Amino acid sequence: MKIPSKFKFLGLEFKVKLVSIIDQSNLNIVGRTDMNNQIILIKKGMPKQAIELTFLHELTHVLFSQMGIDKALKMDSEAEEVVVNAFSNGLYGLIANGTIKC
C-alpha cells in the first residue's frame, strides 16, 4: 500500500507526515491525527506493515470525525479507540489478503 503525502476528504486537505517522535512525553505513540491542522503523523522507522496499519487507523479517525460518526454514536475516546482499531484492522486484513486492491 502506498501511503499518500496528502489527501482530500470532504473538501479538506490532510497532510501525512512520517516523523521520528510524535509525543515527547510518550515515546510509545506511533500515530496521531491533528484534526484542527489536518495533519496525520506516523512514526517513521517502523516495519512497512506497521506504518500501513497506523495510517489506516489514523485515516479511520479522520473519517469518523469528519462524518460525525464519533458524535452520533456518543463515543468517548476509549470507546472510539476500540471501534477505530477494529475497523482499521479489519480493513487492513482485506487489503493484505488482496480482497481490496490499493
Image (cartoon, helix red, strand yellow):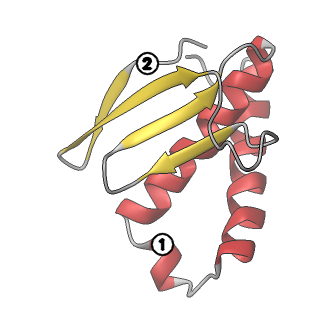
Q: Residue furthest front?
A: 24
Q: Residue furthest bottom?
A: 74
Eye-nearest disc, 2 or 1: 2
Looking at the rendered structure, the kind of residue marked 1 is Ile
Name the spot of residue 18 as percent of width and height, x first.
Answer: 55, 21
- 11 lies above or below 30: below
| Category of crowding for the residue at label 2, using alpha-carbon neighbours closer than 10 angstroms: few (below 14), some (14–19), many (at least 20) | few
Looking at the rendered structure, the kind of residue marked 2 is Pro
Marks 2 and 1, the one that precedes in the sequence? 2
In the image, is 50 to the left or to the right of 42?
right
Q: Which numbered disc covers residue 69?
A: 1
- 102 lies above or below 15: above
Q: Can residue 99 be seen?
A: no
In the image, is 15 to the left or to the right of 26?
left
Quadrant occupied by the C terminus? top right
Q: Nearer the viewer, residue 2 or 43?
A: 43
